[in-house]
Amino acid sequence: MMSLLFLIIATYTAAVLQTTVAPLMDVRGATPDFFAMVAIIWLLIGGGPRGFVAAALVGLAYDLTAAGPLGIALGVYASAGIVLSWLKDRLDAQHLAIQLLVIAIATILIVGSEATIARISGQTNLTWSTLAVRSVIVGVYTAGVSLPVLMVVGWFRDARLAALRTN
Amino acid sequence: MTTSDRGDWRRRWASRPALFCIALSAAASIAMLPERGTDPARHGWQTLLSPAQSAMRSVVESGQDFCRRWRTDSADREQLANAMDRAERLDAENGRLRRSLAALELTATSADRTIEGKVFATPLVTTDVVSARVLGRTAQAVLQGRALLDVGSRAKMLPGAMVVDGENFTGIAMIDVGRDERLEPDRLAIAGRRVWGKLASVGPLTSVVRLTTDPGYRDLVELAHRDGDRLQVSARGVLVGNGEKQCRIEMVDATAAVAVDDEVYTATDGAAPGPLLYGRIAKAEHIAGQPHWRLWLEPALGDREPRSVAVLRMDVNPARLAAVDKTRE
């Protein structure tokens, strides 16, 4: 219950940051994707086997915040979530470098998928190469922005583990 | 349905593939909804976000404002530092210029003592200047009335009164200092380092000045060619006044490089403080076979009569005399 509340606060914060702070962090038309960051970190750190459902809800929040049609991000985030849940069981997701790599690749895939759907449905007329480059920049940028969050989360997790060992 | 069947049903629906299918189906269903159907949800979400967005925007604006102010402050600080640096450099430059000026002044004062790198003793003949007013006709008439100035005769005049030539009395150049200021004939009368004339005769309180253009005026001069800031002496000659507006310069060797507009100065004679300007060459003629140039000089002061002049007064240096006396003792 507590973790669900935390997810709601994190998603709300991501929505606020995406609409206010992200436009100021523009690099060649790309901004960090705070929704993707929240969904992926949730899946890596706390999401259980059904964590992709939470990721899908984050995707829904993205749909509600963005101007495009509803449902697309929901589906994309759910798909990314189930892949990440499967990967998480096979990777050492506690390592910071791996976490960063996963965030970058997953964000590239999420943004790339959204861009592909938008391009196919005629919502954008940007070239495929532009969309690809932008997806990569967003992925790397989001991974960079995630670094301090991952570090803070890691400190909390270590402190909690230390407390558990002491007890 | 048994309890065991109910548990199987829950597990089946709560399994990952089933949940994933539900999520995809929900996504597809929502995507197919008309815009009117999704607008309330979107609007509700935006309303929920709105307060936090406003707060965040004000935080961002404050941050931007702070950054802007900080940047402006840094720019001001940089400008101040630059200005202080410049002021420091200017102070240093001023100090350097002051030192150069002091050195130049020292050089100037010792110029008479140093010629071509040789150090000479304190000059034997020293020069100082006496300022004098040029007396106009009214002033001269007053002096004449007081029998201090006699024109054309020595009858009824006071002892030591000055006698001037009656025929040339009008337009005579006279100054209000004489023997009372230890002046002597032939001393130069100058106005701003330009020669006006020489003292022709010195009375007890007044002196008559022979202008450079007056008949009988003669002086040794040097001709110099100006090359930028430098003056190059090209020849020597004798300046002769003949009563005309332009003086003649004689005895300038025909082989000397002379040109119109060359400047003419008093010749250096070891007593004057430095060259004084007579004027410029107005006309230069060279006749084949003649050993000298025919030159005409336009006086630097022209026809103008200065209101005051300075007369160079020369004397034997008392310091040198005192040194001689000391040696004798």
Image: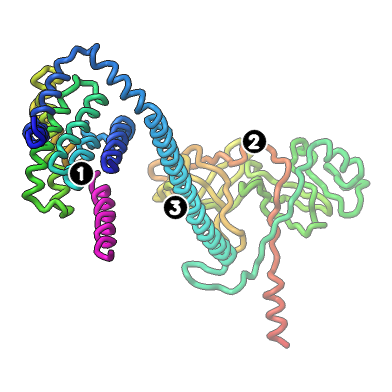
Assess disc 3: are there few (<14), some (14-19) or many (≥20) residues with their C-alpha within 10 Å of its C-alpha. Answer: few
Q: Amino acid at mark 1?
A: Ile
Tell me what residue is drawn at x 39 percent, y 34 percent: B56
Residues at marks 3 and 2 touching, judged by CB atoms closer than 8 Å = no
Tell me what residue is drawn at x 14 percent, y 39 percent: A50
Assess disc 1: are there few (<14), some (14-19) or many (≥20) residues with their C-alpha within 10 Å of its C-alpha. Answer: many
Q: Chain of mark 1?
A: A
In the current view of this chain or complex, which residue is farthest to the bottom? B329
Q: Chain of mark 3?
A: B
Q: Which residues are magenta?
A: A143-167
Vertical position of residue B237 compared to residue A81: above or below: below
Tell me what residue is drawn at x 11 percent, y 23 percent: B25
Image location of residue B173, percent across then percent down: 74, 42
Vertical position of residue B98 compared to residue B149: above or below: below
Q: Amino acid at mark 3?
A: Gln
Determine which quarter of the picture holds residue A80: top left
Residue A151 on the magenta segment = yes
SS at mark 2? loop
Query: Which residue position holds label 2?
Result: B303
Q: Chain of mark 2?
A: B
Position of B225 compared to B99: left or right? left
Position of A154 compared to B52: left or right? left
Position of A120 compared to B143: left or right? left
**Numbered disc in front, either 3 or 2:** 3
In this orientation, does residue B118 appear?
Answer: yes
Image location of residue B227, percent across then percent down: 42, 47
Q: CA distance from mark 3 to mark 2?
A: 28 Å
